[in-house]
Amino acid sequence: MNGPKPEWYDKLKSGPFPRKTFTMDDIYRIEQKASESAAGGRVRKPGFPRRKRTLPVLAAVLLCLAAATFLFRGELAPAVTKAWSGFVKPTEPPQATAPPLQQETGTFYLKGDATVVSEPEAFGGEEVGTVNSEQPVTVLEKRNRFVKIGEKRWIPEWYLNKDAEKRLKEVRLSQFLRERPVVTTNPYYGLIVEGVNFSLYPEEPNPSGGVLKNGRVVQVIKDYRDWVCVNVFSYDGRQYAGDKWVPKKNVGVYDSSLAQEGLLKNPVEAKAPAGTKPYPTPGAKILIDEEVDGFYMIRTDTEYRGRIGKSDFLPNPFLGLDRKEDTDPQWYFTQQEMSDRYEDFAKTRTDDSLKGLEPIDIFRYYVTASEKGDWETVYALLVKGSDYATPSREQYLTEIGREPDADKQAKQKWDALRKDYMLYQEISGDSASIVMTKRGSVSAEDKKGFSLTRNKAGIWKVSWLPMQ
């Protein structure tokens, strides 16, 4: 195919023929010449009857032309393409399409309750409430790791439970909601034992929050696997709107003797950044930077700095000035709501009033009722059933009635423990323990436990003889 091309090849490359070929006159001439070269015969110009004789010849000629076209189709194809390229509109390259919007719209259940902020920025804007995860939310837009759920209402995208549809095919909605991985807890206090930056959500690749140094006091409000969501105070002028998550390993049991953050008892002279001398008032939130010559070098949440005596420092900024500073606040109801809820339970003594409470809450109910000598309420807090050794109500009240000073003895016992012991709760399956650790001691002998059991209805109740 690479040798010299015959003359007809170049003619074919010029494109379609300028005139019609193989007309009836051409066919007649071919037949006339063929007849003259035979035994002197002549052929008349064909009429209609003669056409029957010429059709086989025409078919043969057309067949030969088709065969030639087939044999040389590889050579003709490029030539035809080239000859007609100026007449066929070239294929236009595909138009660049706009990149898809960074959004996932639709309806989603959440992993748990989330704090709503006004802007899709990490710890920016303002907090504008909390979204309840018992109902699905409609996502309008996705931006900057946030999703929009309303006008100026954004939450971190991490909270979307994208596996909900699959899970809801396997279980009922009530069970699905009970399995939400982000658990809202009754607030309790902890202490940062290893400095850490807080995160916008658990396992954030690069924590976007400020640093919490050793000794900072946090209020734990939510729980997720190896993470806790906390409330903190700011001392750098920023508000840090939104949820703040830290690994559980960085949060230890609250100990007032180790706290580096608290309140100011008495007014002191401090120095402002501009050099003026403001006077922070009692109750101002303060952070201890260091200890120098028996004094605390402090700064306030308004960035004032100064020096105070140790006796002017009251640990834990979440608590007011009117409290027993040597007592772990875990012993008390930390919110008026919980105190009111206890009063309601003391009137009804029904398990429905205990739904959703943590073991530490039930413990506080028990301590409060026993100090008041309200043995009916104490008995209502005990776990019941054939699987437990709890006596009947009549037996219990009869036995406790034989101790006329039982309420005074209970109060003396709890006062002594409050004075020297710190509290934290441990949960393992359907069992829980309120661990009491003697302040300043690491000995196992100085620990006490108060046991609780989760009954078949999922409610925490006090075990019989909880402090054996």
Image (tube, helix red, strand yellow):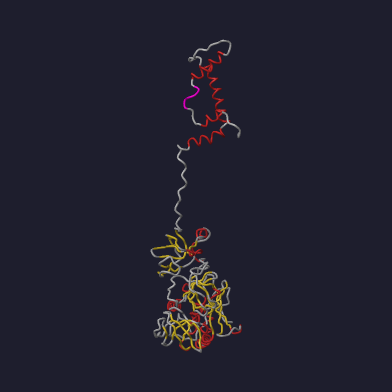
**Which residue occupies the extreme top position in the image?**
40
Tell me the quarter of the image containing the C terminus: bottom right
- Horizontal and vertical percent for residue 169? 52, 58
- Seen from the viewer's position, the closer of residues 168 and 288 is 288
| Above or below: residue 173 compared with residue 193 | above
Majority secondary structure of magenta residues: loop
Q: Where, by quadrant of the figure, is residue 35 drawn? A: top right
Observer-nearest of 132 and 25? 25
| Residue 356 in view (yes/no) | no
Camera-nearest residue between 98 and 440:
98
Magenta residues span 18-22
Q: Quadrant of the N terminus?
A: top right
Does residue 446 appear in the picture of this structure? yes
x and y percentages locating residue 456 in the rendered image: 54, 70
Determine which quarter of the picture holds residue 420.
bottom right
In the depicted structure, whether residue 311 falls above or below residue 188: below
